[in-house]
Image: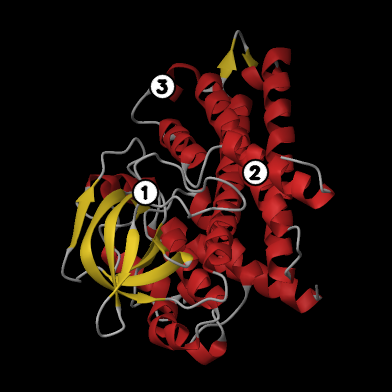
Amino acid sequence: MGVSGIDEREELRRTVRAFLAEHADEAALRRAMESTVGHDPDVWRRFAGELGVTGLAVPEEYGGAGGIAELGVVCAEAGRVLMCGPFLSTALAGQVILASGDAEACAAYLPGIAAGETVATVAVAEADGRWRTSAQTSADTSHTSAARRGDGGWTLSGTKWFVTDGMTADLVLVAASTDDGPQVFAVRTDAVGLTRRPLATLDLTRRQARLDLDAVPARRVAAPDGAALVDHTLDVAATLLSIEQAAGARWLLEATTAYARDRVQFGRPIGSFQAVKHKLADVLVSVESAHSAAYRALDMWATGDPEFPLVASLAKAYCSEAYLHAAHEAVQLHGGIGFTWEHPAHLYLKRARSTHELFDPPSVHRARMAELLSVESGLPH
């Protein structure tokens, strides 16, 4: 990693943080939560278009710039302030299209994503809430199915749940079963037969939707191995979400530490009490470990390390619990004010709880790690 690359990423971090401080502060966050779409469309257009963040990790030939490390920078800054906007969904969808190797799909969809003109997302989970069933058959049990049309095209039928930013997306990448196994299909949200319904969610800073598909026209995103593409999609999703979780947990640690320095009780700052020190020290350890795990997964994705799937699951499992731990302690250590609607601690707690389950909870990722390790070692599983 060159010095110039580090400097460029730090400049990107400062630019994004300054933009979010001006346009995505707590007041803006609360307004977005109360809005119909769940974010400010004007702010999103500037964030995606003017700053070009959705073009990060998209090749220059499709209008992008930067790389995976830069994508991680923006993901962290967005997670730090609970930014309301379809960045995670759109960035993930772009990487799925790119990973497919389908040149026609890349040419058709990536320029719009890179320019900030297309909001995209992925749809994998179904009614059981599971995103994958095992490391080997991530989408083989999908009840959403694809059928060939007479003209050689495809139609999709089924229901997808917990689709992030599903109500505002222009493009959805849907995992569906075919006679040849799982495949990924691109669906325009104005397609005939597609019905979108908003879901009631705990976390109002990230909206989710249910998608009902009734013989919806779709375009197959051709990949040498459809099941591998679905697995890679979920590994990338877990990694980007882990970056976000680690950043949110760090914000909670910083905010709670500052409060412990300023809040005086019995004539002393509460941060001077041994019990408070112990709690903050425990959170610090978990936050630093979460940061290490998340960025290790990011680096292995960027370098194409064969153990990336294993470390992606490790990061998602650890970061999910670290974020939730930091949120619980933040609420507790802020005392009475931490339980109020006016204080932002509860917003982070809800985000931590929702991301704990999104793209599968830690228990599923630990089971997947055990499965991957048993396959690697040749042991039965």
* Alpha carbon separation for disc pair 2 and 1: 26 Å
In this image, 113 relative to 327: left or right?
left
Q: What element carries label 3?
A: helix
Q: Which of marks 2 and 3 is in front?
A: 2
Q: Is residue 320 visible?
A: no
Q: Mark 2 points at which residue?
A: 368
Q: Which residue is drawn at 50% across and 47% down?
A: 359
Three-letter residue code for mark 3: Phe
In this rendered view, identify the residue nearer to me: 58 or 194: 194
Q: Is residue 331 above or below residue 135?
A: above
Q: Nearer the viewer, mark 2 or mark 1?
A: 2
In this image, 197 relative to 142: left or right?
left
In this rendered view, identify the residue nearer to me: 21 or 303: 303
* Alpha carbon separation for disc pair 2 and 3: 36 Å
Q: Where is residue 192 in the image (x, y as percent from the top left)?
A: 16, 70
In this image, 171 relative to 175: left or right?
left
In this rendered view, identify the residue nearer to me: 154 or 324: 154
Q: Mark 3 points at which residue?
A: 339
Q: Which of marks 1 and 3 is in front?
A: 1
Three-letter residue code for mark 1: Arg
